[in-house]
Image (spheres, grey):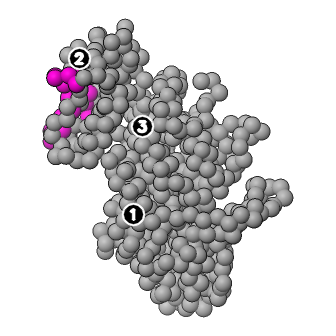
Amino acid sequence: MPAPLAIIPWPRSVDARDGELLLPRGARAEIRGGGGDPLLARTAERLAEVLPSGPRAHEASIVIEVAPDGRADPESYTVEVTRDLGRVRAASPRGAFYGAETLAQLVEPAPDGSRVPAVRIEDAPRFRWRGLHLDVGRHWMPVASIERWIDAIARFKLNTFHWHLTEDQGWRLEIRRYPRLVEIGSKRKETIVGHARRGPKGYDGVPYAGHYTPDEARHVVAYARERGVTVVPEIEMPGHSLAALAAYPELACRPGPFEVRTTWGISEEVYCPKEQTFEFLENVLREVMAIFPSRYIHIGGDEAPKTRWRECRIAQDLIAREGLRDEDELQSWFIRRIERFLAANGRRLVGWDEILEGGLAPNATVMSWRGTAGGIVAARAGHDVVMCPQEDLYFDHYQGPVESEPLAIGGMTTLDDVYRYEPVPAELTDAEAAHVLGAQGQLWTEYMRTPEHVEYMAFPRAIALAEIVWSPREARDPAGFRARLPRALAELDRLGIRYRRPEDL
Ligand code: ACM
């Protein structure tokens, strides 16, 4: 009988064979090819974690081969385990990294070392964008925690970390040209206590601050890169920008002063569409692009009230001059202008689905969060989309009985709900569905003050997400996922992640 294979995400094809590879103490892995890519150094480290320690054996028990072999997908790989050897073959370091991870998940303790069941696995991801988002605007999170989460998600083959860096409640990335973004924008005088929309409101009276230096952000980028994860930065505009306006009130439609927001919810204050604002945003984005090599730059675009623009002479003159119909078209004009700037710098714009209102910028990628409607419209118009619907993939929602869970923003999205989610809306044709790049889980942190709480909300829901974005649709198997989950949870234990243990495990 083959041992149970507790791989998450489940591979495209798994052919369990008879027998097993015994890994004696001191068993060694060898990497061939790949040109010293940092992903391979990490791959070697990962294997060293699971190989039984001892004086190093002469012969390698595991061989990782990286060589171009005509494979189209750089994330694909093959694993073949026989009685003699464990072999991973891939055309790129990313494929090798994933193949080694799959192999690592197969290693079991044995009396005199470890063993791996004989198997042949062919694997490649279903989707290219397999993401987890984190809002550090509402609550700043330490670099070490962020890196621990990146390490964890990479083990389940998620490949995108969407870092939401600016908010009404705090600007978190140091921008050298605009020091007040940190001096003023990264601090708030206090924070609301309890739920912002329910019960009596009070404030804690405790000043709150936190930001990342460019070097710290670069550290996160490099750490992620070694694990096949791209960091996509988000700089919000035109809304969710009150912290920036507190620092630079001249970028608003009306005279300040403004204060960094101390409660949750949406601020009416947005950037004024004046030249000075674009100069500011372009300078900010230049520094952002210098830190983040990601092809995609997220510019937010969600929840931007139009109240101020309706009352603003500059905004109204611009609407008249550009022949725009209304403030929605002005937001579109704003986003298109930023898109041109990003494109001129070789980057692509991604934004929340409000960027559809008033007309989508030509090459924009849309994150569909208000359900799937935005994703459907965008895909039908030939735009790429990432599915992030709040009902299914907002990990700030409750995940169990409200009475026994810590305070959350609302909603209810259990682990099973996440696992049931299908990223391709049934309404799309195959050609339209090709625009669905993937899906992403969201961690908005209004009600998560600590890394521990983020971990509780993120895991294991992020592991269910990992399987739905990697594994073939036909392989979806709730009972099988449950059966494989304990091993994944043990891995989270080893990483020191304080996840929410499912009731039945
Ligand atoms: C969002 O949840 N405002 C994208």
Q: Is residue 366 above or below residue 176?
A: above
Q: Which residue is mark 2?
A: 82
Q: Which residue is mark 3?
A: 156
Residue depth check, mark 3 versus mark 1: number of the one nearer the observer: 1
- Which segment is the magenta one? 56-79
Local crowd size for mark 1, using a 10 Å CA cut-off: few (<14), some (14–19), many (≥20)? few
Q: What is the x, y in percent for residue 443?
A: 57, 51
Q: CA distance from mark 2 to mark 1?
A: 45 Å
> What's the residue type where badge 1 is placed?
Asp
Q: What is the x, y in percent for residue 274?
A: 51, 87
Judged from this view, the residue extending furthest toward the top is: 1
| Visible residue check, residue 366 | yes
The reply to whether discs 2 and 1 touch (Cβ–Cβ < 8 Å) is no
Check disc 1 and report its element: helix, strand or loop. helix
Q: Is residue 36 above or below residue 346?
A: above
Comparing 254 with 326, the one in front is 254
Q: CA distance from mark 3 to mark 1?
A: 27 Å
The reply to whether discs 3 and 2 touch (Cβ–Cβ < 8 Å) is no
Residue depth check, mark 2 versus mark 1: number of the one nearer the observer: 1
Q: CA distance from mark 3 to mark 2?
A: 24 Å
In the image, taking residue 34 as reference, residue 456 lies left or right, namely right
In the image, taking residue 20 as reference, residue 424 lies left or right, namely right
Q: What is the x, y in percent for residue 458?
A: 56, 43
